[in-house]
Image (tube, rainbow, N blue to C red):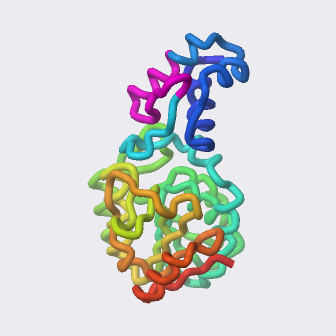
């Protein structure tokens, strides 16, 4: 197994369990503990983890973009449920923005049966997923391809988004915090989502339950900018009270 493959496996375990133990990884991956320590040192240099005695913990406040293949495996059942709920909100004739989140790819899979829908997206995965669906019009934002993220970003992406007036935007995030609002891992990703929000008539936050109570580096917007929150399970009462106060609909079943 190549070192890069091994580190991706370690990353998956870190993001799933929030921590890893050197001895357990050594046995599971059939390499020496010294090799695992070097892998963790590299992941720490890249900003993904913080080394601790006997292992490492997830760096919750990192601005580093998580590789797409790692994000894809996080809470797939929750994202599947969100996608089913989102598909019910999309009507024939809608023009929608879909961001480059893994949740959006689940959404793309669920809207293939729709007719006369226009999707504007900066996601390579969304473009591939919808490339052979004749009843849908799919528009790429263009932009610079970010290695490992399967997303397009940059000035061209923002300019392209601003050229459209969409009916709805469906976006996700890295964290949603009661006081700090909605945030993502870095400025580029947050900037693309801000542009989509500004160019859409109705704003939907499609976020799985693991993101509630989490903060992230780059702020996207206040909760008040969102019209509807779609998630995989009922949020705790403090969230429901805030949504009611802000006039935000919350769909979870």
| 34 lies left or right of 26 | left
Q: Residue at x 48, y 83 (%)?
A: 241
- The magenta stretch spans which residues? 38-55
Spot occupied by residue 73 in the image (x, y as percentages of width and height): 65, 46
Which quarter shows the N terminus?
Answer: top right
Q: Residue at x 40, y 59 (%)?
A: 141
Q: Is residue 142 visible?
A: no
Q: Nearer the viewer, residue 173 or 44?
A: 44
Was residue 42 drawn as part of the magenta stretch in this picture? yes
Q: Is residue 106 above or below residue 169?
A: above
Q: Nearer the viewer, residue 198 or 65?
A: 65
Q: Residue at x 62, y 36 (%)?
A: 13
Spot occupied by residue 226 in the image (x, y as percentages of width and height): 42, 78
Q: Nearer the viewer, residue 69 or 183?
A: 183
Q: Is residue 107 above or below residue 72?
A: below
Spot occupied by residue 199 in the image (x, y as percentages of width and height): 35, 75
Q: Nearer the viewer, residue 121 or 56?
A: 56
| 71 lies left or right of 199 | right
């Amino acid at each position: 197994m190549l070192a890069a493959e091994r580190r991706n496996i370690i990353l998956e375990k870190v993001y799933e369990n929030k921590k890893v133990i050197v001895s357990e990884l050594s046995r599971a991956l059939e390499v020496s503990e010294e090799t695992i320590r070097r892998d963790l040192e590299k992941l720490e240099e890249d900003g993904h983890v913080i080394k601790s005695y006997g292992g490492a913990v997830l760096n919750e406040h990192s601005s580093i973009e998580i590789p797409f293949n790692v994000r894809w495996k996080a809470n797939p059942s929750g994202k599947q449920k969100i996608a089913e709920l989102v598909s019910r909100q999309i009507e024939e004739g809608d023009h929608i923005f879909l961001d480059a989140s893994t949740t959006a790819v689940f959404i793309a899979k669920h809207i293939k049966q729709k007719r006369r829908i226009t999707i504007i997206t900066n996601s390579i995965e969304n473009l591939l997923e919808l490339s052979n669906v004749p009843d849908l019009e799919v528009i790429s934002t263009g932009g610079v391809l970010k290695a490992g993220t399967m997303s397009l970003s940059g000035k061209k992406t923002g300019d392209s988004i601003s050229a459209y007036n969409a009916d709805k935007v469906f976006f996700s995030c890295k964290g949603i915090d009661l006081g700090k609002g909605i945030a993502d891992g870095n400025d580029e990703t947050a900037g693309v989502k801000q542009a989509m929000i500004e160019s859409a008539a109705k704003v939907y936050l499609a976020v799985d339950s693991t993101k509630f109570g989490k903060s992230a580096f780059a702020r996207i917007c206040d909760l008040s900018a969102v019209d509807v929150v779609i998630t995989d399970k009922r949020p705790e009462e403090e969230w429901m009270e805030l949504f009611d106060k802000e006039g935000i609909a919350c769909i979870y079943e």
